[in-house]
Image (cartoon, coloured by chain):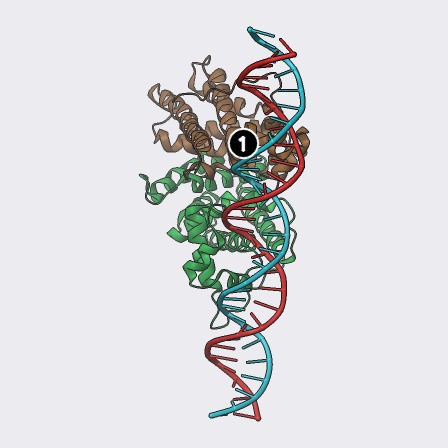
Chain colours: A brown, B green, C cyan, D red
DNA sequence: AACTCAACCTGAGTTCAGTTCAAGTTGATT
DNA sequence: AATCAACTTGAACTGAACTCAGGTTGAGTT
């Protein structure tokens, strides 16, 4: 449960720039399809310089995933802590999930497209550390939703059901959007968010 | 919309065996993590023999995905055509989605974990053909659900909502299970199916 | 039985993205 | 100006996907 502390950025550090460029590349072209060297180019450094900041291409990916999971969790907590009516908390949680920048959309896409990486062990130390941290954050986020449901059920606002299973389902419903949503697409994110919000409320509170 | 015709299997053909072995490997170890040569070993042929049947490792993956999409569609049609009450049709569609063998669970997992492959064009001909076919089948499956909802709405069994968006959401909810479900896990698939079935009905019919 | 042809298979070699290494350069700190 | 950690690099290495040129198998034909 120990939060990985980010390497404190020296003033010359390109770490943040690499992460940003990698999110753009991985999110638009796909992780496998983008060459690691392309990321280097976009940042304006040689390929080998990447290895000063990340042990491997995968290590960078896992870092992006972990950061996005942390962000999702933080946003959820921030959005739901003030509401004490369970239905309002539920609505707030869903709205928070879709209150994101375009860059964050890419991060969610990357996260969802590579969840399977979190199941199998990694060979190198730092990769494995990121994987474990990310896997724990997945559980934290799942618990966020389960707890919300448990509270609502015990208060009588939601009918009693398997909160764990239902929590995983709502979460699955919410994040499934990132597989197909494109900012350039026909449906604005706000509209999607509203439909999903309603769907979640009916699914849980009725 | 032209259904790819499977290469008619000569009596010596190992194509089916390769597909079966690949599903096991890709489903359990993950596509990236399994070596193409391991699949060959498991079938009992040399690595190069694989290229007699598939143009590339990715071509094999795309084929598995297309076959699974076709199967999902067929099962949906078979399960829903007889029911004329919209709610019953909806329930039947969901139940059909979870009425699967362990091997089919792996195929669903592979399909879900590599949906992103269907967005970007492929370099080689046969890969691209499989990709296009798979992408069309995705749309067919989405239309299956949209049509079910449209029928229910026009009959007054479901409240009027954006059927396309809601269809994509139900589908997203249903398939999200394959990301985390493991046959060895604590929850039997039947229980999951029942919970999701109820959730879908509430989401759509109330 | 020998012949044919397509289907099927193989060992040796090529490619290419990811990665390692040994040797730099830079610039803030003392 | 000397130091030292942070940072960068070109050249070489690795390993898994893939290609190639040729070899084997066996059902059907003569």
Q: Is residue B12 above or below residue B117?
A: below
Quadrant assignment for the C terminus of chain A: top left
At horizontal 58% and vertical 59% (from top left) the residue drawn is: B55
At which x and y percent is residue B131? 60, 52
A196 or A140: nearer the viewer: A140
The residue lying toward the viewer, choosing from D11 and A173, is D11
Q: Return the chain for callout 1.
A: A
Q: Secondary structure at mark 1?
A: helix
Which residue extends farthest left?
B186
Q: Is residue A21 visible?
A: yes
Image coordinates for residue B58, horizontal then vertical, percent:
55, 52
Question: At which x and y percent is residue D21?
Answer: 62, 69
Above or below residue A178? Residue B44 is below
Residue at position x 63%, y 31% from top? A24
Residue occupying image coordinates x 49% and y 60%? B47
**As drawn, is A11 to the left or to the right of A139?**
right
Quadrant where the image shows the N terminus of chain A = top left
The image quadrant of residue B195 is: top left
As drawn, is B200 to the left or to the right of B138? left
Residue A206 in sight from this viewpoint: no
How many discs appear? 1
Q: Position of residue A137 (x, y in %)?
A: 43, 26
Label 1 packing within 10 angstroms: few (<14), some (14-19), many (20+): many
- Residue drawn at (35%, 18%), measured in percent from left and top? A155
Residue identified by numbered label 1: A60
């Amino acid at each position: 449960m120990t939060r990985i502390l980010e390497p404190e950025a020296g003033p010359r550090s390109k770490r943040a720039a690499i992460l940003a460029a990698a999110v753009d590349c991985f999110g638009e072209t796909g992780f496998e399809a983008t060459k690691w060297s392309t990321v280097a180019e976009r940042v304006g450094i040689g390929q080998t310089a990447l290895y000063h900041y990340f042990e491997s291409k995968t290590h960078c990916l896992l870092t992006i995933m972990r950061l996005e999971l942390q962000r999702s969790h933080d946003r959820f907590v921030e959005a739901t802590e003030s509401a004490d009516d369970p239905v309002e908390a539920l609505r707030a949680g869903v709205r928070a999930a879709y209150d994101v920048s375009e860059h964050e959309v890419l991060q969610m896409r990357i996260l969802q497209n590579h969840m399977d990486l979190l199941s199998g062990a990694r060979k190198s130390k730092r990769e494995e550390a990121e994987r474990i941290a990310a896997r724990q954050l997945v559980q934290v986020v799942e618990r966020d939703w389960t707890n919300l449901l448990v509270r609502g059920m015990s208060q009588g606002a939601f009918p009693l059901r398997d909160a764990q299973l239902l929590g995983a389902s709502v979460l699955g419903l919410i994040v499934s959007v990132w597989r197909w949503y494109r900012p350039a697409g026909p449906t604005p994110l706000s509209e999607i968010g509203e439909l999903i919000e309603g769907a979640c409320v009916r699914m849980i509170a009725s």
